[in-house]
Image (tube, grey):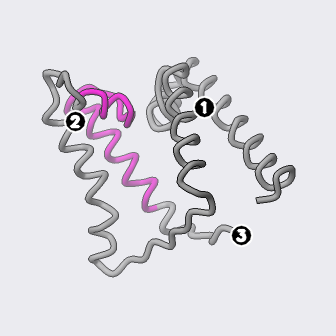
Amino acid sequence: MTEFTPWTSLGGGVLIGIAAILLMAVHGRIAGMTGIMAGVIPPLGSDWSWRLAFLAGAIAAPPLFLLLGGTVPFAVPVGTGAMIIGGFIVGVGVFFGSGCTSGHGVCGMARLSPRSIVATVVFMIATFVTVFITRHVVGL
């Protein structure tokens, strides 16, 4: 059972929303992590500096949270091989979906983008099917 953390979840959602709004307001860009990361992988995009700052903040936030006394319960119930395969599958999905859950689910749906709404519905269906198979068919 996953621990129910409504206040922490609400706080995280608010911070994600603020970051997405600020990025759109300041740079006119969508806060999709894969698109942001693509601009810092060589060859660098002309706007690589804000992308690097955004990614650095996303990477620095959990350690900062821990330093401030927060806790992050973390467990990985699968081996490294399964994580690599899962990462590959996610990468393929991001490529064919023309974006990731943050770009489509947070920013695209907020703009009522039909493409993002369809992509998010597909992400959610794939998630439900994966969890069902993992828990009830495979038994993990």
Picture layout, residue 60 above or below residue 74: above
Q: Is residue 78 visible?
A: yes
Highlighted magenta segment, given as a residue range: 11-39
Residue in the picture at 31% in, 51% down = 58
Residue in the picture at 43% in, 58% down = 12
Q: Residue furthest front?
A: 81
Q: Mark 3 or mark 1, which is nearer to you?
A: 3
Measure how far apart labels 1 and 2 are at the Cα level.
24 Å
Q: Mark 1 or mark 2, which is nearer to you?
A: 2
In this figure, which residue is indicated by the disc labeled 3? 1
Magenta-span inclusion, residue 45: no
The three-letter amino acid code for the residue at tag 3 is Met
Q: Quadrant of residue 93?
A: top right
In this figure, which residue is indicated by the disc labeled 1? 120
Disc 3 secondary structure class: loop
In this figure, which residue is indicated by the disc labeled 2? 51
Dot 1 or dot 2, earlier in sequence = 2
Picture layout, residue 101 above or below residue 65: above
Residue in the picture at 40% in, 46% down = 17
Disc 2 secondary structure class: helix
Q: Quadrant of residue 49?
A: top left
Measure how far apart labels 3 and 1 are at the Cα level.
24 Å
Callout 1: few (<14), some (14-19), or many (20+) C-alpha neighbours within 10 Å?
many
Measure how far apart labels 2 and 3 are at the Cα level.
36 Å
The three-letter amino acid code for the residue at tag 1 is Thr
Name the image quarter holding the N terminus.
Answer: bottom right
Dot 3 or dot 1, earlier in sequence = 3
Disc 1 secondary structure class: helix
Relative horizontal placement of residue 39, taking residue 1 as reference (left or right) = left
